[in-house]
Amino acid sequence: MAEATKKRKGTALLAVMDENCSSCAGSPLCEAHCPVDGCINLLYEEVPGAGLKPYRVFVDNDKCIGCQMCYSDDLTKIHQHKETGEIFYEYANRFYDSAKKPVEPDAMPKKIQLQLIGTESEDRLDKKICPWDAIKMYEFEDGLQMAEQFYDITKIKQVNGLYVVDNEEKARLEEKQKDLYY
Ligand code: SF4
Ligand code: SF4
């Protein structure tokens, strides 16, 4: 358990998208904010006689670094210099050093030399990304349990390069989701 948490980059949080997700009509806003390729994925459902239609999104729990960038637009991003290990904070397009002193843009290393290692949120304005409040951040282990209510990556099929949940699995999950509220 501790091992899984230790291996993760960034914070020990996990994003979980719940039943309020509408898939943003097939253009997930949260996915556009996620810095990790293939982490937030559009999930399709089967429509009898009519092919596939966007259903929700699911998070690949192994890829999520818990950075919260899908969750809030009001974060301090923490970058690390890939070679020197130096830490820089970024908030509202301004940069700060590890002592939180401002760094002029031309004194900053190039973007390619930096890697995002996490974020900090002070919930200053609570600018949530999801218009439907379908994204919640959990401590990693709690998030794994919660995610089981909404998606099981081992039961998601790939059809012509698209992720698809079949009707049986969708019904199973929607039944499970009732446990959360009744
Ligand atoms: S922003 Fe919200 S509604 Fe849109 S795809 Fe992401 S979780 Fe779903
Ligand atoms: S917390 Fe970060 S890595 Fe995880 S899904 Fe959200 S944006 Fe992607």
Image (cartoon, helix red, strand yellow):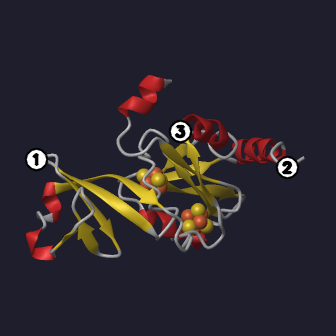
Q: Earlier in the sequence, mark 3 or mark 1?
A: 1
The residues bearing labels 1 and 2 have C-alpha atoms spaced at a distance of: 49 Å
Q: Mark number for residue 181?
A: 2
Q: Looking at numbered disc 2 in the image, what kind of residue is underneath it?
A: Tyr
Q: Nearer the viewer, residue 100 or 93?
A: 100
Q: Secondary structure at mark 2?
A: loop
| Residue wearing tag 1 | 84
Closer to the observer: label 1 or label 2?
1
| Residue wearing tag 3 | 140
Examine the rendered structure and indicate whether residue 14 appears above or below residue 30.
Answer: above
Q: Where's residue 175, x and y in %?
A: 82, 44
Examine the rendered structure and indicate whether residue 24 appears above or below residue 45.
Answer: below
The residues bearing labels 2 and 3 have C-alpha atoms spaced at a distance of: 22 Å
Q: Looking at numbered disc 1 in the image, what kind of residue is underneath it?
A: Thr
Q: Secondary structure at mark 3?
A: helix
Q: Position of 49 compared to 110: left or right?
A: right
Closer to the observer: label 3 or label 1?
1
Say few, some or many: other residues with alpha carbon within 10 Å of mark 3 (under 14 / 14 to 19 / 20 or more).
many
Q: Nearer the viewer, residue 24 or 96?
A: 96
